[in-house]
Image (cartoon, grey):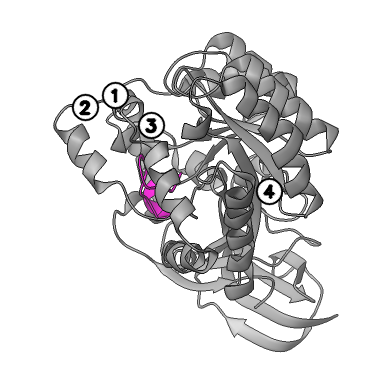
């Protein structure tokens, strides 16, 4: 069988079956950017490869997937970090005009070129750790033109770098100052004007909202979901992070791809997510950075077999994190996730959280040939080490 590239003498973590799908003496072959075989070397076909790469016993995993980021933005919020160290809460800062509103001001003032330039620095840090797919949310523009600018900048990342970008419209992220005291009018604008226009322009892959006491109510969120579903777009939600507004259950009722954060998730929400197949995206970077003390209900998620993903939540205010490897370590140390849960959380389950499980997330014939090749003896090292990067080679679409 002909192929363009074959990676031989490798140990594989295919992420198939019930666990990590370990293959001790494996090979991966690719043609036209797709995997044509991934499995035991002695059971596969004989390949006539244009290029053969000897992996010298290294591990190959699927390319990593960061399924929740706000990586396109301008400015930083280091001054708010100082205030939190002095005792101010996230809600106090937000209500005083900081938080998301602060980044809205700097992002509105930035050009699209400036947004792209700033984002690429953060993107490059992720790519250097084997990330091949990044979800990018808008939500720091909060006007039609500024949301378009953010989503367009996100798309340009995929032109400048070999990476898959998934764009999520987060117009219902915060109430912009020009709509102070009138959230209903803003929600109408988001659902009836902004979302249809951006979707028609091909700039939106999914729709998100911030359902919290300092964000939007469940009823307002539901109107955004209804608008998204009229356009055939999948939904996801920042849910139950600071309080229990039953956002996860709301997302599940709408067949949402994921509910994210989930520190205040209750049993009913877990059950709803399990029934709907909604992925729990845990964001330990935000938990750590905000010094939270209430953990997501990991045991309940496990018991109900809810798929768990992990992401950086890269954003300037509550998780200025550009290391998915460190996010895994945080998931293990702060939430007591296992090594297997962490690795599945940035591959197979992260793909599910983006609705891309048929395209990426596992090493299987027919899927995109996105690989990460690691200089480690044990896969646990990818979760165990802090500040180390054992990536040997990143492969995106076979290259």
Labels 4 and 2 touching (C-beta < 8 A): no
Foreground residue, 377 or 140? Answer: 140
The residue singled out by tag 3 in the image is 336
Q: Position of residue 50 (x, y in %)?
A: 74, 90
Residue at 58 percent across and 66 percent down: it is: 157
Labels 1 and 2 touching (C-beta < 8 A): yes
Identify the secondary structure beneath mark 4.
loop
Residue at 54 percent across and 42 percent down: it is: 139
Mark 1 against mark 4, which lies toward the viewer? Answer: 1
Q: Position of residue 199 (x, y in %)?
A: 77, 47
Foreground residue, 333 or 93? Answer: 93
Mark 4 against mark 2, which lies toward the viewer? Answer: 2
22 to 173, vertically: above or below: below
Q: Main secondary structure of the magenta part?
A: loop
Q: Is residue 163 left or right of residue 140?
A: right
Residue positioned most to the bottom: 50
Identify the secondary structure beneath mark 3.
loop
The residue singled out by tag 2 in the image is 88
Q: Is residue 158 left or right of residue 141?
A: right
Tell me where the magenta segment starts and ends, as one range. 313-327
Mark 3 against mark 2, which lies toward the viewer? Answer: 2
Q: Looking at the image, is mark 1 or mark 3 earlier in the sequence?
A: 1
154 to 78, vertically: above or below: below
Residue at 49 percent across and 48 percent down: it is: 70
Q: How far is mark 1 from mark 2, CA to CA?
A: 6 Å
Residue positioned most to the front: 178
Report the disc number at residue 16.
4
Q: How far is mark 3 from mark 2, CA to CA?
A: 28 Å
Labels 1 and 3 touching (C-beta < 8 A): no
Position of the C terminus, as image quadrant, is bottom right
């Amino acid at each position: 069988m002909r192929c363009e590239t074959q990676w031989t003498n490798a140990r594989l973590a295919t992420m198939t079956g019930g666990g990590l799908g370990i293959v001790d003496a494996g090979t991966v072959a690719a043609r036209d950017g797709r995997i044509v075989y991934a499995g035991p070397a002695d059971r596969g076909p004989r390949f006539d490869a244009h290029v053969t790469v000897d992996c010298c016993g290294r591990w190959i995993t699927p390319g990593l997937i960061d399924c929740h980021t706000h990586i396109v933005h301008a400015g930083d919020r280091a001054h708010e970090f100082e205030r939190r160290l002095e005792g101010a809460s996230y809600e106090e800062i937000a209500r005083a005009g900081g938080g998301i509103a602060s980044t809205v001001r700097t992002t509105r003032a930035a050009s699209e070129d400036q947004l792209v330039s700033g984002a690429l620095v953060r993107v490059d840090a992720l790519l250097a750790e084997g990330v091949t797919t990044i979800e990018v949310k808008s939500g720091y523009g909060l006007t039609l033109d500024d949301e378009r600018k953010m989503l367009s900048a996100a798309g340009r990342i995929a032109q400048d770098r070999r990476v898959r970008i998934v764009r999520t419209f987060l117009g219902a992220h915060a109430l912009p100052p020009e709509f102070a005291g009138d959230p209903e009018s803003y929600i109408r604008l988001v659902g009836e004007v902004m979302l249809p226009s951006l979707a028609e322009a091909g700039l939106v892959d999914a729709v998100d909202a911030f359902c919290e006491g300092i964000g939007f109510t469940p009823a307002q969120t539901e109107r955004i979901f209804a608008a998204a579903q009229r356009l055939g777009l999948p939904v996801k939600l920042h849910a139950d992070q600071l309080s229990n507004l039953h956002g996860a259950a709301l997302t599940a009722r709408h067949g949402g791809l994921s509910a994210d954060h989930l520190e205040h998730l209750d049993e009913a929400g877990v059950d709803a997510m399990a029934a709907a197949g909604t992925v729990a995206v845990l964001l330990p970077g935000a938990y750590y950075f905000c010094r939270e003390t209430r953990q997501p209900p990991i045991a309940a998620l496990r018991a109900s077999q809810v798929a768990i993903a992990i992401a950086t939540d890269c954003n300037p205010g509550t998780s200025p994190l550009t290391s998915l490897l460190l996010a895994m370590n945080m998931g293990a140390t702060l939430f007591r996730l296992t090594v297997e849960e962490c690795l599945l959380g940035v591959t197979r389950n992260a793909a599910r959280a983006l609705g891309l499980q048929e395209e990426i997330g596992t090493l299987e014939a027919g899927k995109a040939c996105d690989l990460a090749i690691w200089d480690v003896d044990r896969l646990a090292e990818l979760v165990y080490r802090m500040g180390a990067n054992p990536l040997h080679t990143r492969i995106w679409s076979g290259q």
